[in-house]
Image: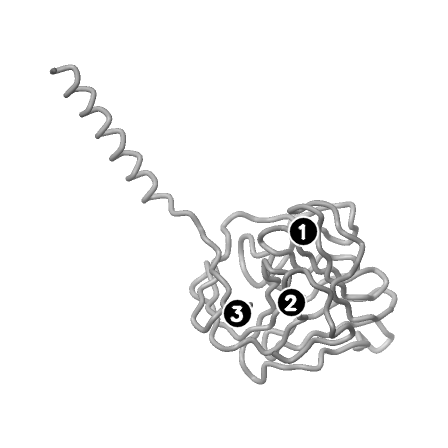
């Protein structure tokens, strides 16, 4: 009888220790979409682990050199990206957005999470230019595709929908939709959605967009 009691006591201690360890190591869970979009007040965490996106060449991977926030934030498009760069990748690894060397901004699906690209575009700007770059404004959500000139970079494509004068960020969601939201930072570890989405590619579910060449107002 004493042996049974001693064994049960050890199991109880082990269970309590396991629960304590789990409580001290919270699992980061991605927020859920409602009707295809993040609702007002949604907190989207930034992973503390850096991720690898493709830079300059689809066959080479490098840690992204974003300047606006630390850590792994591959689903957010903000700042400026150069020719051939992967702009964003969904957290589940199924969708990627590239500014191709031919000057086209293109959204693709992958065959498996972080696997090979399926060569059919879900959405694209349908543009062509040498030495392109893509800029995602954090003040009004405008996307600009730029090309060099003797007088400095010039726009050769500009998105048709703005967030207005509020802080904006573009998110490549796990459902494949590329969506512009207004937001603010919650410390260095997360952003908070502060308003309704203002634009999207309408590629949710991995479907081919019906707004090629532009983004659509939500």
**Which mark lies nearer to you, 2 or 3?**
3
- Residue matched to label 3: 35
- Residue matched to label 2: 79
Q: Say if 161 sits above or below 81 in the image.
A: below
Q: Image point 86% across, 74% down: which residue?
A: 149
- Residue matched to label 1: 53
Q: Position of residue 66 (x, y in %)?
A: 62, 59
Is label 2 in contact with label 3 (beta carbons under 8 Å)?
A: no
How many residues crowd around disc 3 within 10 Å: few (fewer than 14), some, or many (20 or more)? few
Q: Nearer the viewer, residue 35 or 199?
A: 35
How many residues crowd around disc 2 within 10 Å: few (fewer than 14), some, or many (20 or more)? some
Coloring scheme used = one colour
Q: Nearer the viewer, residue 118 or 153?
A: 118
Quadrant in which the N terminus is drawn: top left
Sequence order check: which comes first, mark 2 or mark 3? Answer: 3
Q: Secondary structure at mark 2?
A: strand
Sequence order check: which comes first, mark 2 or mark 1? Answer: 1
């Amino acid at each position: 009888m004493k042996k049974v009691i001693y064994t049960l006591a050890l199991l109880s201690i082990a269970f309590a220790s396991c629960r304590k360890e789990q409580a001290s190591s919270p699992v980061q869970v991605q927020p859920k979409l409602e009707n295809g979009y993040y609702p007002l007040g949604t907190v989207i965490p930034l992973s503390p682990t850096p991720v690898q996106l493709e830079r300059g060449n689809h066959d080479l991977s490098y840690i992204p050199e974003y300047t606006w926030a630390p850590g792994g934030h591959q689903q957010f498009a903000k700042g400026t990206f150069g020719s051939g760069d992967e702009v964003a990748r969904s957290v589940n690894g199924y969708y990627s957005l590239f500014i191709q060397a031919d000057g086209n901004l293109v959204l693709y699906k992958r065959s498996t999470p972080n696997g090979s690209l399926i060569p059919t575009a879900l959405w694209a700007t349908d543009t062509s230019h040498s030495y392109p770059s893509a800029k995602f404004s954090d003040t009004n959500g405008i996307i600009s595709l730029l090309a060099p000139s003797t007088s400095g970079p010039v726009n050769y494509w500009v998105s048709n929908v703005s967030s207005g004068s509020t802080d904006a960020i573009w998110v490549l969601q796990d459902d494949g939709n590329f969506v512009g939201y207004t937001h603010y930072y919650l410390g260095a570890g997360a952003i908070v959605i502060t308003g309704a989405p203002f634009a999207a590619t309408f590629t949710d579910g991995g479907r081919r967009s019906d707004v090629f060449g532009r983004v659509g107002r939500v």
